[in-house]
Image: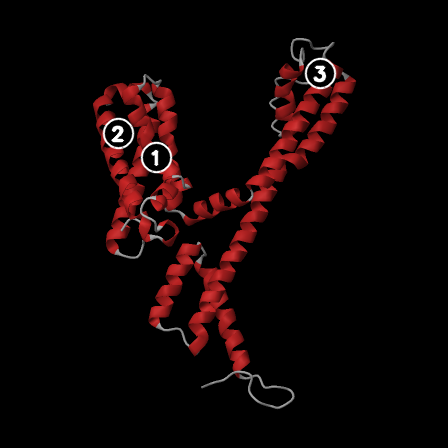
Amino acid sequence: MVEEGGSWPSRLFNGSIMLLIASNVVAIILESVEPIYQAHTALFQDFETFSVAVFSIEYLLRIWSCVESPNYYRPVKGRLRYMVSFMAIIDLLAIAPYFLSMFFNIDARFLRVLRLLRVFKMTRYFQPLEILMQVIRMEAPVLAAAIFVMLVLAVLAAGGIYVVEHDAQPEAFGSIPAAMWWAIVTLTTVGYGDVIPVTHAGKMFAVAVTMLGVGMAALPAGIIAAGFTREMQKRRKMYQSSVREALEDGVITKEEHEQLEEIRKRLGLNLDDAQAVTRAEFSLLTELKGSRCPHCGERLFDQR
């Protein structure tokens, strides 16, 4: 019921959790408006207690039932391994602020920010978000390298602008740490304009940094986009293999069609992509049925 999405109890359970997550996000946002919070403090607190109770039960149910998955089949080690998985950590963070506030005096504003982490629980129910998180995990080393290069360039840009603008604007570029703000907003092409170079050398240096930043700021986005494309291609090939298995007898039965639909949803493919893959496999099958060997004339496809 908690993991499979085909049965009506599972759909009801997952739909209720999704609705509760969305309601929590709205409640947390409204809590930040002080007049609303003061007028309905008891309601917000009761709703938070109810939400934590439901999320806690869900968390325990997922830990208990995770051994049904081949990845976590061992009773103890499997559950411990599941507890350190990404989604299990998100589930734990969703309830941790409530229990932390029982033992520690934590600023309410900080608690609200921590509770907003519940929105990441939506990742389990929206396939595109799951694909995006998978891509980020796969591309983490490359993204880390790109971020490191950005930090190096920011330090070099701060040092350069400090050298050329220090005498003209000691209040804005009095030190390299003070110049870091200008370097970061310029490299990321945000350019707030609150701190700008005034000397000719500083302006020329700023042009070079801005042009360099245009390419560097787009680098992480390009890495994620390329990784997303590769992941979708891999998932299409997986679906294609499933379609080929279903077409081994030359026809897709109703049961096979339902299985393919479940596979499509699990892989996060849209209906048009799945239909295109299926049509291509049908065309290939039809072509093979009519093909003959150029040497002996025998059919290349056994129609029995």
- 138 horizontally vs 252: left or right: right
Q: Quadrant of residue 161?
A: top right
Residue assigned mark 1: 92
Q: In terms of sequence position, does the residue under pointer 2 or pointer 3 come before the other? A: 2
For the point 29% across and 42% down, the residue is 17
Q: Earlier in the sequence, mark 1 or mark 2?
A: 2
- Mark 3: few/some/many CA within 10 Å (<14, 14-19, 20+): many
Q: Nearer the viewer, mark 1 or mark 2?
A: 1
Q: Amino acid at mark 1?
A: Leu
Left or right of 257: which side holds 191? right
Looking at the image, the residue that sits furthest to the right is: 201
Residue that label 2 marks: 48
**Residue occupying the point 78% across, 19% down:** 201
Q: Identify the amino acid type marked 2.
A: Glu
Label 3, label 1: how far apart the Cα atoms are: 45 Å
Choose top left, top right, bottom left or bottom right for residue 174: top right
Q: Amino acid at mark 3?
A: Tyr
Task: Give the answer, above or below, for where 23 lies relative to 15.
Answer: above
Whether pointer 1 and pointer 2 mark residues with C-beta atoms closer than 8 Å, the reply is no
Residue situated in front as seen by the camera: 140 or 170: 140
Image coordinates of residue 145 in percent, x first then y, are 62, 36
Q: Residue placed at 67% from the left, 12% from the top?
A: 175
Quadrant of residue 91 within the rendered picture = top left
Q: Which mark is residue 162?
A: 3
| Distance from Cα at disc 2 to Cα at disc 3 | 50 Å
Q: Is residue 282 above or below residue 35?
A: below
